[in-house]
Amino acid sequence: MSDIIQLLPDSVANQIAAGEVVQRPASAVKELLENAIDAGANKIQLILKDGGKGLIQVIDNGCGMSVTDARMCFERHATSKVRKAEDLFAIRTMGFRGEAMASIAAISQVEMKTRRHEDELGTMVEIEGSVFLKQEPVATAEGTSISIKNLFYNTPARRNFLKSNPAEMRHVLEEFQRVSLANPTIAFSLHHDGVEIFRLPSSVLKQRIVHLFGNNYNQRLIPVEEETSIINLKGFIGKPEFAKKTRGEQFFFVNNRYIRDTYLNHAVNKAYEDLLPDDHFPLYVLFIDIDPAKIDVNVHPTKTEIKYLDEKSIYAILHSAVKRSIGRFNISPTIDFDQETGFSGMITHKAPEEIVPPSISFNPNFNPFAEASPAKEPTVFSRNSSAAITPSTKNWGSLYEIANHTEAEQTAIDLPGTAPLPDDSLVPVQKQLMQLHNRYIISQIKSGLMLIDQQAAHERILYERFSKNLEDRKGASQQSLFPQTVTLSPNDYELAKSLLEDIKSLGFEVREFGKNTLIIEGIPVDLGSNNVNETQLFEHLIEGFKNSQQELKLDRRDALAKSMARNSAIKSGTALGQQEMNTLIEQLFACQTPNFSISGKPVIQTIGLTELDKKFDK
């Protein structure tokens, strides 16, 4: 029997390795940007087409490469950053594995132009599927320009698994934000399909955060700084009132390398535990500087996981530093026991001679036993006004009618075409409803008592209505008198663009208006009677959509309908009139699933007469 184990060709090995290193266009963007940083560049340009699937080009003004290095950099395990095994414990560069360029060249068409500062001519290299096509001298600018075309062109199965252009662009933007946050002194620019998305000048960290996320972030940031013998910590955290229900604005950097670490993330969240609800996540951009010998970054090909030598101490330092920064900038409530404010409002700064004592006017001829004149009614004086008010005594007898008033009989709700409840005894027999703490609606039913969660009920009604609008693609819209503009972060703007058709189906009238800006010209008719802030509603819609997809992995339209229902429904604590409560119950019983909320929790609870009798020991 012949031998069956064979050594794989380099081209096949590179394609296999590419599955770990390059998962999507954003992975290639990350590797190229980090190589440009390691080359000492202070200006980096990123140019994309079709979300990175058609073209990824990175241009930098770094040190460049020689003729030999230009060819060698595409070989597996070829790197300028590691010479021996001990170097792995003193890594300060972004890359060191020597796999990225070989993996990228194995699954795309690559063209690279590079020139060192001391050379007059540069070098051009063309590679297609790990095969060298051309290498020749070329006139080019100092630094390196790498173009990656048609990613996964020779592995169609991988290319078919890529998402839509807007979805892939959002992943690219996430990587771009991480790299640019870690290097605020480097100028970055990003162009997509001929449109400039970012132009970030060299700046300090706070300005870089504001340039990336928007001017309104300038007032949201709290600085954090701590120096210890174990780590040096610096960066910014967000004020609690600006926390969001979705993750995405949490950044940890260890020695300027972006990492994901649930343990350290817990340390930050624990510092906010008395200030935030459980489902809210604060903003933070934190940099940990630590001795490279005390960490191991060679854990995963993506280099986003790190092992620490003294993890518990880092957790404690991080938690205490964040908590101290929150308290130092008066975010936590404080009490001043030295100031007595009970009488502070009674102190006057007038001179004693200017103070006029109050005077009392009275009628010396007033006789309380004299009969009142029929032509003149008594007058009542208001405490806050010198004008007399004449009370009306007409129909005074009607005040006593309430004692003899018989409560009107209430009829059962019987709507044609509505979905019947499992038990007819659950249908309210009265229309005289009561609201408990402005949260629950109480109604008498044949078998006892029914309680309805008003917010959950309204969410269920709106969810089914919006779902139908999305399915029929004809949600009614009400035009706004004054169109509103909403400016989103680049990530949210790309998401909104991908959802635009579905958002219009809900009843919104929205169109693009310049860089990261949309104009809202109309809102759904169901919301027209409410005093809604169109801009706030739209922002919450996008935020709720991201939250639904992250937690439940819902279908896009289902997540959109749930987000819209949650943001548009009446909230607990809202007072309702009799007609409003009746309408709410009628519409709830007309739903396909009236008994359960859109989160799967009960909407209706019943208490039977037998159970009530037991409460009174009957």
Image (cartoon, rainbow, N blue to C red):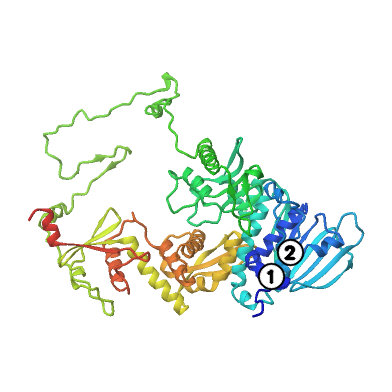
Q: In the rendered view, would you say 366 is above or below 118?
A: above
Q: Quadrant of residue 56?
A: bottom right
Q: CA distance from mark 1 to mark 2?
A: 9 Å
- Which numbered circle lies on residue 76? 2
What's the residue type where badge 1 is placed? Ala
Q: Which corner quadrant holds the N terminus?
A: bottom right
The reply to whether discs 1 and 2 touch (Cβ–Cβ < 8 Å) is yes
Viewer-proximal residue among 416 and 115: 115
Query: Which of the 4 quarters of the picture holds residue 11?
Result: bottom right
Relative horizontal placement of residue 131, taking residue 617 as reference (left or right): right
**Which residue is drawn at the image coordinates 65% and 70% (left, top)?**
16
Classify mark 2: residues with Cα within 10 Å, few (<14), some (14-19) or many (20+). some
Residue 388 picture location, percent across and down: 28, 41
Residue occupying the point 31% across, 26% down: 359
Q: Residue furthest left?
A: 618
Left or right of residue 160: residue 341? left
In the image, what residue type sits under mark 2?
Arg
| Residue 224, position as x, y percentages in the image | 58, 40
Q: Is residue 235 left or right of residue 398?
A: right
